[in-house]
Image: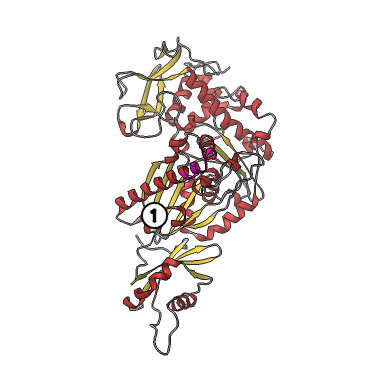
Amino acid sequence: MTEINMRGLSEKVFLRPEAPSEEEHVSDQMRIRQGLEENGYRDIRFSLEALRTLYPLCREAGWEITVTLVHEEQGILITAVEAGDRTREHYGLAVDYGSTTILMQIVDMNTGEVLAEESETNGQAAYGADILTRITYGMEKPEHKRELHQATVETFHRLLEKLTEKTGIQAGACPVMVISGNTTMVHFFLELDAWTVFSSPYAPVTTEPGFFRGRELGLDFAGEVFFMPGISNYVGGDIVSGLLLMDFYRKDEIGLFFDIGTNGELVIGNREWLLAGAGAAGPALEGDISRYGIRAREGAIDTVRIEGGDLSFTTIGGTKPVGICGSGIIDLLAEMRLNGWTDIAGNLDPQASERIVYFEDEGEYGAVYATAEESGIGEPLYFSQTDIKQYIDTKAAAHTMLDCLLESAGCTEEDIGHYYLSGAFCAHGNLESAITVGIFPDVPLERYTALRNSSLDGARTLLLDRNRMEDIRYLRENVFSVQFASMPDFLIRMQAAKFIPHTDMEKYPTVKRKLEEKGRKHM
């Protein structure tokens, strides 16, 4: 691939400073600094590790050396000095530091190419499936915060090893890593008390931690680590990362960004104003409900269709199903609603299909989406009436957050020029099904853009372009946060959204039309 002009957070510069002599005995450090200053670099300082390598390396290399620079906000840090021209061997790391899954990419800093990507389940899950449980655990004893930190470090080490094995590049030797995560996750990594994020007055220890040496964080990583800054306790660095990918904050047109998963974070606005809010959505949208709900992996049912009473599905990897992930659940609920298997409240109708079966052990009905013969575990896979209720609760929370943010901004759904959706569920799910279920507004599909992982892509955006620090400063200064919990009618709105798609069918004209075309009642 042809090299392009990158202005990344790190640089490698090849220098040929004059060798010292009896007449010219300026220090090695000063020779390198002068060489860089002649090329326009200013505010330069050396890390201790780099300083320790200068002798005898520079002399043995005949004063032909490559200097690695990291562009921090307050100046330039020299992190390494190598013999010869090593400018082509320049790589960086971008990380999506999620509460459930951590993803890491290794990137060619000369071309911008992603050389490899790996993911790992966050080791913190051993201390609680949800963030609040982990916060409580961390408060119990001082050493518990250390355990949460160490679980994170071990997960990062596994990812570094995987990338090294896959590419042959020593990932731990990269000069810079950009981490994008929510405010609570950053507190866990830094061994800070995360209770400040969730308790009044909702003032975290930090929302802008900045740069740290990898070793300082307990990582076997020689370079600098930058944490993407957040905006508030609930609107973290992962949302700032997402906003870097979209330019609606520079346009007259109003845009809305919705990062939806276990938690939901939203930002609405344009070049004149920006408003953000966040809240708990729940694990259902990512598949973590029901006995057979699983994450998107091989054997997970990812699409469901019902035609003429016959149910069909596809799985990730084309294998026999072992469970159903978030996108499959959305399809299943949408298809059951449109085909009369459930009513507007999500109640199953056992007369509608032979696949709606009463399960004695659970004492309730369930919809069998894969029979024992069809499944990969030799037993039927089903979605119970309780599962449906839990899912409706989750989707109602997501819908209500969006509804409340629109009202806070003085906007209607039609005022939004474009909707940007992020999260695994958004990237892989059927948008029409999500609208049918009532998660998103019923507006033309061309007004939606689904992003696979805006947190990871935003981290890489900054990694490759240090000028985006200016955008980050702008966002931190201009995004105003609202607290949904303080809205007096939040719970009332949420009750109205606990239907498929909603109690107000006028909000969902295309769903109403589909139901009428199938001869189904829409109330």
Q: Residue at x 44, y 46 (%)?
A: 150
In which quadrant of the rendered view does residue 223 lie?
Answer: bottom left
Q: Residues within 10 Å of mark 1 (few under 14, many from 20)?
A: some
Q: Main secondary structure of the magenta part?
A: helix
443 and 206: which is toward the camera: 206
Q: Residue at x 56, y 44 (%)?
A: 193
Amino acid type for the residue under numbered disc 1: Asp
158 and 434: which is toward the camera: 158
Q: Is residue 232 above or below residue 496?
A: below
> How far from the left and from the top, in percent, is residue 26?
45, 83
Q: Is residue 348 above or below residue 112?
A: above
User: From this viewpoint, is residue 432 visible?
Assistant: no
Which contiguous range is marked in magenta?
A: 139-146
> How far from the left and from the top, in percent, is residue 120?
39, 42
> How far from the left and from the top, in percent, is residue 143?
49, 43
| Mark 1: secondary structure | loop
Residue marked by disc 1: 220
353 and 174: which is toward the camera: 174
In which quadrant is the N terminus drawn?
bottom left
